[in-house]
Amino acid sequence: MSRDLVFAYPGELETRTGGYGYDRRVVAALRDLGWNIELISLGDGFPKPNARQLDDAGRRLSELADDSVVLIDGLAFGAMDEWAGREAKRLRIMALVHHPLALETGLDGGQQEAAAIREKAALAYTRGVIVTSHMTATELAANYAVPAERIAVAIPGMDPAPLAAGGGDPPLILSIGTLTRRKGHDVLISSLEKLHDLPWTCRIVGSKVLDPGVAAELEGQVARSGLGDRIELAGQIDDTRSEFAKADIFALASRYEGYGMVFAEALAQGLPIVGCAAGAVPDVVPGSAGFLVPPDDPDAFAAALRRLLEEPETRISMADAAAIAGAKLPSWRDTAVIISDFLETVP
């Protein structure tokens, strides 16, 4: 088959989240492998577009020539079941699923069910599905009726980066993630309140504009904690490698991760980790490199942080283990080769 591919995504490809970062790096690496890629933005509103936004997105894709191979980011595709049903015979539709939309934090039972029904219907019209973790592959096979042989797992690649020096006085706790409910920054802040007796500073890096309501809540929580001189909501930082390099501990209390690229980045730069045993995080973070506690448990999160703060030998041991695990992570070329090989099998 030809190496022509349409890649469609919601919003702006330059958005600074892990999912969009994956998209950008895969597109670049596929081009290096000889793929001709046409980029199409599907516009705003996803994953919950209004009728006009959904129609506009479908119209952009329906203008494609017959038999085009089109790979659609799941943040949009999960809501495009009706369009997929109309075009599945004419276009060779593929989906890139970072994590099922029904598993996003903040949905009630009815919203979760509706999202799952739509995404399951949309996925039924695909020729194949690319996922970013083995956990998501298992989820789609078990609960979304996607045959395992139509799923390719392409975990995110990693770039070489400087190891964190450690030895901060006081230790710097770094958290990186957009200020949204799913990232659990409220849990982190609550846990830090329980550690006011110890020396530390904390820097929370992430966009404040994707969910301004949550960002405002977090700013209020920091103010009420009385720790505003020790906890910084730093906003979006484009190059996070220098952030990791200056830190002593990486801490993120995500309630769910389809993969958790930022945890892999922390490993690659040799940081001990405190996170939650949620989604694919346990697949990314080995037990030797950090502590994973139940989601939404500030007491457990604080206890794990306390160990790393009070036990320098544990912190150093876990930092070493993180660097070893990080060195084994795939490159972006490795990730792209998996996707390229899978795309070439599209019927």
Image (tube, rainbow, N blue to C red):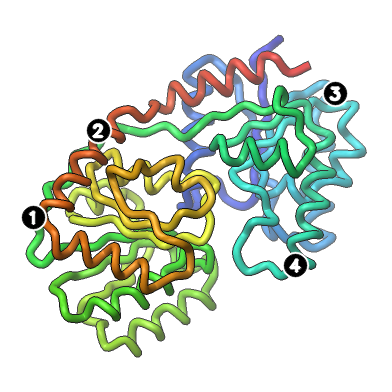
Q: Mark 3 highlights which residue?
A: 66
The mark that comes first in sequence, 3 or 2, is 3
The mark that comes first in sequence, 1 or 3, is 3
For the image, the number of numbered tags is 4
SS of the residue under disc 1 = loop
Amino acid at dot 4: Gly
SS of the residue under disc 4 = helix
**Tag 2–tag 4 contact (CB < 8 Å):** no
> At x 24% / y 33%, what residue is drawn?
324
Of badges 1 and 4, the one in the foreground is 4
Q: Mark 1 highlights which residue?
A: 167
**Tag 3–tag 2 contact (CB < 8 Å):** no
Q: Mark 2 highlights which residue?
A: 324
Q: Residues within 10 Å of mark 4 (few under 14, many from 20)?
A: few
Amino acid at dot 1: Gly
- Disc 2 from disc 4: Cα separation: 41 Å
Taking 203 as reference, is 158 above or below it?
Answer: above
* Residue 187 visible somewhere in the drawing: yes
Side of 165 relative to 127 (left or right): left
